[in-house]
Amino acid sequence: MARANAVDALDALTEQAIDWMVELRSGAVDEAQRAAFQAWLAADARHQQAWHSLGGALDATFGQARAGQGRASGARTDAVSHAIEQVAVLGARRRRMLRAALGVAGLGLGSSWVARSSGLLADWRADLHTATGERKTFTLADGSRLQLDARSSVDVRFGDGLRLVQLRQGQLRAEVFADAAAPFVVRTEHASLRALGAQFMVRQEESRTQAVALSAGLEVRTLLAQPEQRAVLAQGQGAWIDGMQITRLAQPGLAAAASAWTHGVLHAEDQRLDEVLAALRPYRLGYIRVSPAAARLRVTGIFGLDDSEAALQALAETLPIDIHRHSGGWLVRVERRAWGRSSGLVEEI
């Protein structure tokens, strides 16, 4: 409970500094507001200390997310400014998320944890990307189309007889424009996938990649095995690739279930709870943590991705779990319910 309290309990001066920083980056500040800010700074040495401390915390939390390691300090400052501008224009809810993010970093969870897991910032370094809760379709230079799931990103490299898409994170659905002279290839950390048909799905997880052929065929190759493994997936077939081996999937209705996200739906068929929660994470700001005991529970059902709160409520009503929400939902803990207790959503400080 002490850690949860720490998330919420940013001191009053830091709260004021956050409000001033968001206000000053809103694009609508006038001279009277600037004068009021200078007066606030001058009123107390602790105000200046809070202001400078906030700048350092934001630089640590957001700078690497956009500028990348090894960039000049000026680039990091620009990244922080852009992050605050985004928080300003997106309103009060993002301000609360910013406060919670700073509180989480203050607990020692680390700036990289916040930037990578919370969903406050999209992957701006990528050629194409989506934000938390956003699905978007992009038309490429050759006429092919990529639909990216929430919090997904890709780099696109066309030329020298090859159309290459590097999936950095998340998942995509590809509709490929045929060109025999330039194969269309999607690469992840674990696999290389060449389109033999028009449509396919690719999802990258931390330790493996899932590929599903939605039409015609899809050639799948491992990237780490020596010699490499290769397989061709027919329409409706799928596989997991962990870099060393290919494991075919034989479940009925695989293609429909795998592409359900394109319609804002999560279709779970006897899946582990941690897999279901992983699919919900890109659709909510903050972080979901699931205990090992709860992670192993099996889930079957259909859930709306665009309302993660309703999905969590449905899980709490049908599984022996407690869902603990901290800091207005910024941190969510999912625990296996103890015997004799009713399950549900538990609001905590």
Image: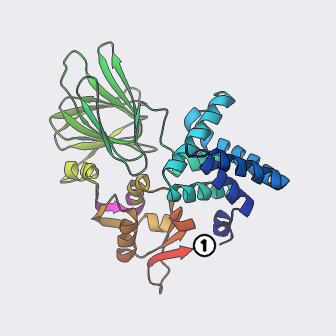
Q: Is residue 131 above or below residue 188?
A: below
Q: Is residue 69 above or below residue 84?
A: above
Residue 108: tell me if it is visible: no
Residue placed furthest toward the bottom: 340
Kindly identify the residue that appears in the image at 25 percent across and 33 percent down. 145
User: Residue 54: where, in percent of width, then height?
Assistant: 71, 49
Residue 271 painted magenta: yes
**On-image quarter of the C terminus:** bottom right
**On-image quarter of the N terminus:** bottom right
User: Residue 252: where, in percent of width, then height?
Assistant: 18, 54
Kindly identify the residue that appears in the image at 74 percent across and 59 percent down. 13
Question: Residue 209 falls in which quadrant of the image?
Answer: top left
Residue 164 painted magenta: no
Decide whether the magenta segment is chiefly helix, strand or loop: strand
Residue placed furthest toward the top: 160
Dot 1 corresponds to which residue?
A: 349
Query: Disc 1 on helix, strand or loop?
Result: loop
Kindly identify the residue that appears in the image at 50 percent across and 55 percent down. 91
Part of the protein shown in magenta: 265-276
Residue placed furthest toward the right: 45
Q: Which is nearer the eye, 252 or 65?
A: 65
The local crowd at label 1, few if under 14, some if 14 to 19, many if 20 or more residues have their Cα within 10 Å, is: some
The kind of residue tagged 1 is Ile
User: Residue 15: where, in percent of width, then height?
Assistant: 68, 59
Q: Is residue 109 above or below residue 10?
A: above
User: Residue 35: where, in percent of width, then height?
Assistant: 71, 48
